[in-house]
Amino acid sequence: MRHLSHWVRDLAVALCSVMILAASPVWADDAVSAGDAAAIHQAVAGQLAAFQRDDGDKAFGYATPKIHAMFGTPDNFMLMVRNGYAPVYRPRHVAFGAVDIQEGVPTQHVLLTGPDGVEVEALYFMEHEADGSWLINGCVLRPSFQA
């Protein structure tokens, strides 16, 4: 039987993903410009690099204000990532895919090989900020169907 803390953690991660998607503004266009796609790629790559260095402040800096409000501190955020997103926290391999629109939200697709050798696809839901920057508003992992 799983420890109660694992159930609570899994439930919290699932609820956060649902809340983030529900609160995300809908992207008016059905495509993302090349410049925006490059900025989105840079934000996701920057956060992945920060995780590799265990730089919680920098990693948390790539998250939206909504994520900041949910987790409060970089330490809480890093704990969630370490416990619930091992392929994101310590990928063996990273391959960036397309940026497209998923349910009205600009989304960066990333193929990750986790520390266990299992490939997953990460969907990074992005938010365009008033200052023109792109921040990460959530991430969902799903099985990879890559050959």
Image: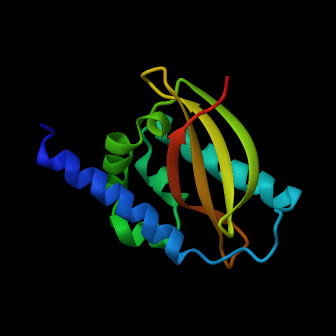
Q: How is the image coloured?
A: rainbow
Image spot of residue 101 (x, y percent): 73, 61
Left or right: residue 139 compared with residue 16: right
Residue 61 to residue 146: above or below? below
The image quadrant where one finds the C terminus is top right
> 41 or 87, which is in the foreground?
87
The answer to whether residue 34 is left or right of residue 38 is: right
Q: Hey, which residue is sitting farthest right in the picture?
A: 34
Q: Is residue 95 above or below residue 28?
A: above
Quarter of the image where one finds residue 34: bottom right
Which x, y percent locates residue 89? 45, 37
Is residue 26 shown above or below 58? below
Q: Is residue 2 above or below residue 108?
A: above
Percent across and percent down for residue 104 are 68, 70
- Residue 64 x, y percent position in the rendering: 53, 67
Q: Residue at x 71, y 49 (%)?
A: 41
Q: Residue visible at 48% across and 68% down?
A: 20
Choose between 63 and 15: the one closer to the eye.
15
Total numbered labels placed on residues in the image: 0
Q: Residue placed at 44% from the left, 44% from the top?
A: 55
Quarter of the figure that contains the N terminus? top left
Is 40 displayed left or right of 67 in the figure? Answer: right
> Which residue sits at x=73%, y=72%?
132
